[in-house]
Every structure is written in C-alpha cells, then in structure tokens.
Amino acid sequence: MDNINEGLIPNIDLIPVILSGGTGSRLWPLSRASYPKQYLNIDETNNFSLLQNTYLRLLGLKKLKNPIVISNEEQRFIVAEQMREINVKPNSIILEPFGKNTAPAITLAALQTLSNSNNPMLLVLSSDHKIENDENFRKVIKDGLIEANKGRLVTFGITPSYPETGYGYIESYNELTKESPSSKIKKFVEKPNLDLAKKFAKDNHYSWNSGIFLFKASVFLKELEKFEPEIINNCRTALKTGSKDLDFLRINEDSFKKCPNKSIDFALMEKTNLGSVFNLNAGWDDIGSWKSVWNNSKKDTMGNVTKGKVLLEESKNCYLRSEDRLIVGINLNELIIVETKDAILVVSKKATQKVKEIVQLLNIKRFKEGKDNIKNYRPWGNYTSIDKGSSWQVKKLEIKTKASISLQMHHKRSEHWIVVNGTAKVEINEKISILNKNEGVYIPSGAKHRLSNAGDIPLILIEVQSGSYLGEDDIVRFEDLYGRSS
C-alpha cells in the first residue's frame, strides 16, 4: 500500500511554513519573549531546538524545499542563526511588526510563495511541537499530500489520550481509526470544559487540533478570499510595499495593522466545506506547559524529573530544573520548580496553564523578568548581565568567530574590556590593536569603537561599564554588518 501511495504523491514543491513568533510564556522563566521556548533544547532525544527539529523531521519528503519562517523583529537573528546551524537557508524570513494571529501570517507566506513558485504545497507548522516518531509523521504527511492535491484543505488531529481542556478539538463526520484514518471535517470546537473534554476523549469523532495544515497555496487563498478578503488585500499590500533587509522580508506596518486578528481556524477552517482531517499518530505534543515537559521527560522510579544541580528526597511526580543554583527538595508531591539566575517558579502541576497569566501580571507590574532574559542574544553572539549598580554594570560578552559588533559610540558611558578567552581585534578612533587572554583596554565615552573576533574560537570578554546612563539605547551606530541602525 505504501508503494502505491508513493506513486500518488503529487510531484510539486513542498514548502514548510514555520510559525515562530510566539513568546512561550507558559514555560516561564526558562522561556521569555526575548528568547522563547521554540529556540530552546527541550527535546531529550537530540541536541536541536524545537524550531530546528520542526524542519529536520521533514527531511526525506519528496520535493521538500527550504522553509518560510514567520517571526518577529526581536527574534529575527535567533531564527537566522538557528537555521544556519543546521545548514538551511530559509526561502524567506518574514518579519511581522506585531502578531495578528495565524490567518494573516499564513496568508503572507502563501502570497510570497505564489510570487516566487508555481503553486506549491504549503505545510504549515508551529515551531514548538514535539514529534516522537518522525517516520510516522512523514507517512501521514504523504497521505495528506494526496488529499491536498485534490483541492482539499488538510489538517491533522491527535487522538486524545486524556481529557485535555487546553486544546481545541476537531469533530469529524467519520470516526478516525487505524483502518479509517481520515474524514471530512464537521466542525471545530473551542477549548472545552472538563465535562465536555471527558466526553470527547471517549469519542473517535473528536481529535485534538494540532494546528498543522497542508494545502495548495492557490486553494488556500481562493477559499480565504470568500470569507476574509480584508486579510488577503491588506497582506498583499503589506508585502508589495515592504522591503528586503539582508535575509529578512519586512512587511509594511501600516497595511498589516489593518488585518483582522484571526486564527486560520476561525477565519477559514470553521467556514469552509473543503476541510479534511487526518489522524496523526506520531507521538505529538505541543510542549505548551511545564506539565507537558514533565510528560515528555524521562522519569525516575518515583516519577520525578530533575535537571541541573538538584537534590531531591522523599518526593513524587515532580519536575525540578536548575539553570544555575542548587535546588534541594524534601517531601514534595506534584510540584514544578524551575530556577534561573534571576527568577524561580514554584507551581502545582495541576496549575501550569496559569503560568501565562502570571507572566501577564509580571509585565503589567513592570517586572523586567517577565520578558527579558539575563542572557541577551545578538547577531554577533550574546551578552549576559553579571551584576550592576546605579552607575556601573558588569557583563560577559561572547563574540562568534568572524563576527563583530557595530562601529559605535556611547554618549553617557565608558567601557573597559578584559579578554578571558580567544583573540580580540579592537578599533578605537581608527586605531586598531589585538588583545589576547588576560589583556584589556579602556574605551572612553564619546570614542568611536568596534570589537571583532580575530581568532578561530569564540571570543569571551568581561565588560565593565560606568557612567550616568547604562541603557542599551545609548548606542550611535556608524557601520553595522547586520543592517541595524541606532
């Protein structure tokens, strides 16, 4: 049967559309808006991030092309670097000036592909899913390609393993079974209460909505135009009046702002008669909470998961993760404890869906820990805040090989750099010097300066700042390899 189906798979390009603009706030404090969960290595089976695995598990599919990634401004260099690490040059990295939900994001990708390709298949994927069985996943995608080639809008449902209230559900006309794994869609159901979720979990007409879609670009746009022409018109204008910036495609902010904020489910899939659902039996999980991280982790005989510096005694069914300091737990039950350098989360496993609400509260109360990491990523590498006072700050800088910061100047602060690993090329007011391990240099305020990695290994420095103002916006850029302005 597999060989017969292989012959039915359409011989047209398959372009993954990876949605990677989320903040992953339910996995705070590890995941934050400045570096959310899709860029973290949460999957224990390999050393890749969730975003990287989203593309890598597709390898082997017929006519697979490089992906389109939908991201936001703040995360653009993280996306580009993680794709570079797996030797993938994206078809395009489309930058949304702000989130407008999935329907406009997918529309941007569909319009972009039709301008560059001959009506490809689009495989829409979230960047934060985990799939245990890649081979089964690819097999179901192949079956979906045959259906999508008939002009159908295909999505993939997960057989509920328990009554989950955090997922939407798909009701199919026919029961989804191993013998009959696909059906036309009857309707979509929003996140149910517990009583309804229990009912759905026992009925093979209902499946979890995975948020994975497959269709021809032209079919998607033609059908969406029936129900949401405003989305298509504004996205078309936003692309046409946008601009190319290095590897990124910046869309027009004013046009995109006019797009209705709607999911693909609400804008199209709940209204169309072309919807089909396939049963996805591949060990899917969206890693949407710390409870799901615990579910997907290897446990000890007492059901505990520990990461980092943890000592746990007389405890059951807990998840303890230390990124820096030692955690000691005694007589704990059903708890999640996650420690980072600047925040600690302690939550009952039953309440992990509420972490998102706490992050919103942190942001309302202006706790910088709600959004910002101590470690900040830049196109040249990263820096970590070590300590600070009112007029001084200490950072650790890591500069990638062949990378350099912009040629810049600060009005209100001076800097002192000390090399602890690698070789630095330092330019100060057009004078160039080379610094090796244990050597340092002083950069007075007002001096035009640039730092580059002059060696073949990562360059690590300690930076001591002093001055009346230490904000990151006190940077005047004169030249920049990455297209950034002041």
Image (spheres, grey):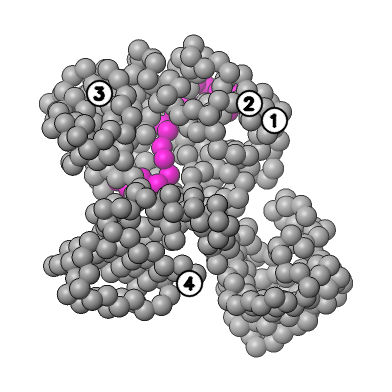
Give the magenta-colored segment's residue range: 112-131
The local secondary structure at tag 1 comes to helix
Contact between labelled residues 4 and 3, with CB atoms less than 8 Å apart: no
Asked if residue 171 is positioned above or below residue 440 in the image, the reply reads above
Residue 258 image label: 2
Cα separation, mark 2 vs mark 3, equals 32 Å
Instruction: Please report whichever mark, 2 or 3, sits nearer to the chain's N-terminal start.
Output: 3
Q: Is residue 299 left or right of residue 211?
A: left
Residue at (76%, 52%) from the top-left corner?
A: 485
Q: Is residue 39 left or right of residue 395?
A: left
Residue tagged by mark 1? 254
Q: CA distance from mark 3 to mark 4?
A: 45 Å
Q: Amino acid type of disc 2?
A: Lys
Whether residues under marks 4 and 2 lie with C-beta atoms below 8 angstroms apart, the answer is: no
Q: Quadrant of the C terminus?
A: bottom right
Determine contact: label 1, label 2, CB under 8 Å: yes
Nearest to the observer: residue 233 or residue 80: 233
Residue of label 3 = 171
Q: CA distance from mark 1 to mark 4?
A: 39 Å
Q: Position of residue 443 (x, y in %)?
A: 80, 77
Identify the residue position indicated by label 4 in the image: 341
